[in-house]
Image: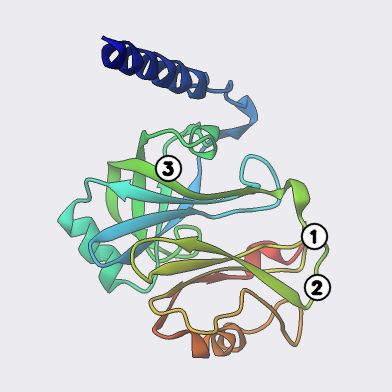
Amino acid sequence: MKTAVLLFTLMLFSSLAIAKEEKPLRPLDPDYMGVHSMVLVSKSSTIYAANLAAYQKPHDVQLLYKLESIDLALLQTVRDGQLTTIKTKPFNLDQLMRGDQVTVFADVYAGHFERDGMLVYENIPLKFGKQLYVRKFDDIKPSSRRQEYDVVSLKKNYKIYVHRIQQAPSYAQLMHIDVEAGCLAKFSTSSAVPKETETQFKFMNCGSMKPLYFETQKFEGH
């Protein structure tokens, strides 16, 4: 009898704890409603979407998501191409910022859709399954030669390094590292906007490295 009472008590407290953790989602910020652009990158059979950030709303956020239920043709496009970008139909980016699972319709381009990219898929559904990284520009630092990267850990030794964009001039960069060995997340470069090859050299001791994305044009000035 005492055992049954104890089990009931434990179950009751567990249920209360779970209920307490389930907080209602905060309201969406209407300022983030609009058309959004992203870059698609891949690892094995997984595709990740990264927001193409800019300094102004509704694009002032660095965001990385894992996509679900990937079409094989899309996976091959991302794997085989040097750059794959998407232009979404209007939706509220704040849904992804707060970690929602969302299906978004988008046009897919081989290359940059704003820079002579070629449309390869039109108005296809993309399911954003899991938020891996989010950073708003609330705490953005002045432009500097001192660079800092956030590390997104996935499975095994696979990590994605995300450059923390600074005030202009700066740059956006995604790198994937398969084996981490003495890999630095903070280092100095020759200028606030170094060449991509210089940043790659900084990761040479990390193990297997693959550049995913590098962009300077959007961050030349406000």
What quarter of the picture does the C terminus occupy?
Answer: bottom right
When the figure is inspected, residue 109 is found, relative to residue 2, above or below; the finding is below
Choose top left, top right, bottom left or bottom right for residue 44.
bottom left
Q: Residue drawn 37% across and 74% down?
A: 82
What's the amino acid at mark 2? Answer: Ser
Tag 2, which secondary structure?
loop
What's the amino acid at mark 1? Answer: Lys
- In the rendering, at what x and y percent does residue 157 appear? 38, 71
- In the rendering, at what x and y percent does residue 30 appear? 61, 25
Task: Estimate the spatial distance between the alpha carbons at disc 2 and disc 3, rounded to whole Å.
Answer: 32 Å
Packing grade of label 2 (10 A; few <14, some 14-19, many >=20) is: some
Q: Are marks 1 and 2 in contact (CB under 8 Å)?
A: yes
Q: Residue drawn 45% across and 15% down?
A: 16
Q: Residue drawn 22% across and 50% down?
A: 70
- In the rendering, at what x and y percent does residue 106 appear? 36, 43
Q: Which mark is residue 88?
A: 3
Specify whether 112 is left or right of 194.
left
Q: How many marks?
A: 3
Task: Estimate the spatial distance between the alpha carbons at disc 3 and disc 1, rounded to whole Å.
Answer: 29 Å
Packing grade of label 3 (10 A; few <14, some 14-19, many >=20) is: many
- In the rendering, at what x and y percent does residue 73 appear? 17, 58
Tag 1, which secondary structure?
loop
* Residue that carries the numbered disc 1 in the rendered image: 141
Closest to the observer: 50 or 25?
Answer: 25
Task: Estimate the spatial distance between the alpha carbons at disc 1 and disc 2, rounded to whole Å.
Answer: 8 Å
Q: Which mark is residue 144?
A: 2
What's the amino acid at mark 3? Answer: Thr
Camera-near label (2 vs 3) is 2
